[in-house]
Every structure is written in C-alpha cells, then in structure tokens.
Image (cartoon, rainbow, N blue to C red):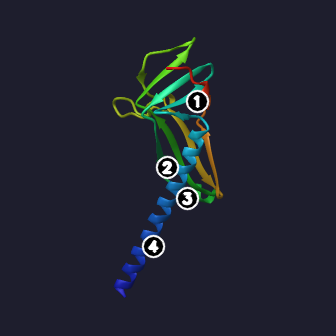
Amino acid sequence: MRKLRYFVSLNLLLFIIGCQIGIEREAQAKAEQFWDTKITKCGDSHFTRSDKEIIELKGVSYELLTEPISQSDELNGIEFNGTTILTATSRRVYSRNHWGAWGDGPKYKDEMGIYSPYNSVIASVMKKNGQWTVESAWMTPSTLLSKVSCDAVPSR
C-alpha cells in the first residue's frame, strides 16, 4: 500500500511538472511571436524602429521570467503570468543620416544584478481563461518599438 501511494504521488508530481514545462514552452512561443512584431532579423543583426531612429542590435536573446500563481490568480482564471525580456550584447542607433557608435545593449539587470524594468525592453505575458496576451509593459522602451523591414535599413 505504501508503494502504491508513493507511485501515485510520484506520477502526480511528474504530471504537474510536465504541465508547467508545457505552459512555459507555450508562453515562450507567444513571447517570441510578440518580439517578431517589434524586431526584424537581417543577416547577423536585429533591427527595430523607435520614432525616427533605427536601432541595430547584436547578440539578441529573449528571456522569460515566470511569476507564481496565487490562489486568487487561479480563482480569476489566470493560468500563467510572467515577463518576457529582450536583451542584446550591443546596440547602435541610426539617426540624422548616420550610424552612431556601438554601445551596450538593453539589459534587465544592472552590473550589481539588480532588476531595472525602466531601463529594459520588457512585456507582460499572461494566459487567462485559456487566452494568451502579450503586451508591452507601460512606460518601458518596448511600447515605442516598431518593426522595420530589412530594405528600410540604411547601409552600414
């Protein structure tokens, strides 16, 4: 009987872990779809537009931070809640008809490892009542970004 309880408990735990991994993969895919509406890959660089400037990014990656779901969240139909973050190792800006110098890319953490959402390119990711939403976080740089075609990128 003890072995049966252990077996059932172990299978339940593995099922829960499998579901969590599945929803995180789904969230990552939704986040990447969102960034595809803001960022264009041309060759070995990524480009985006902010107002009248074109931004070139190198070493682009996307991170997904998950937040725990509380009982209140569950009662409100929230199945997943998190943040997607765009980071890059380097960036430069095309403005006033010339490319600027390369600088460090956007980072979510500063040199001391402290999170800084106001200096980051982030968006919220949520699944509520079976529906996914990915939205730019209010007053962060991601609200200002728009997709640019490779043909519109000035020569480098």
For badge 1, the amino acid type reads Cys
The residue shown at (42%, 75%) is: 11
Counting residues from the N terminus, which is met first, the one under dot 2 or under dot 1? Answer: 2
Q: Is residue 150 above or below residue 26?
A: above
For badge 4, the amino acid type reads Leu
The residue shown at (61%, 32%) is: 147
Q: Which residue is mark 1?
A: 150
Q: Which residue is mark 2?
A: 67
Q: Is residue 131 left or right of residue 19?
A: right
Q: Nearer the viewer, mark 3 or mark 4?
A: 4
> Do the CB atoms of the residues marked 2 and 4 lie less than 8 Å apart?
no
For badge 2, the amino acid type reads Glu
| Residue 105, image x, y percentages | 44, 27
Q: Is residue 19 above or below residue 28?
A: below
> Do the CB atoms of the residues marked 4 and 1 lie less than 8 Å apart?
no
Q: Nearer the viewer, mark 4 or mark 1?
A: 1
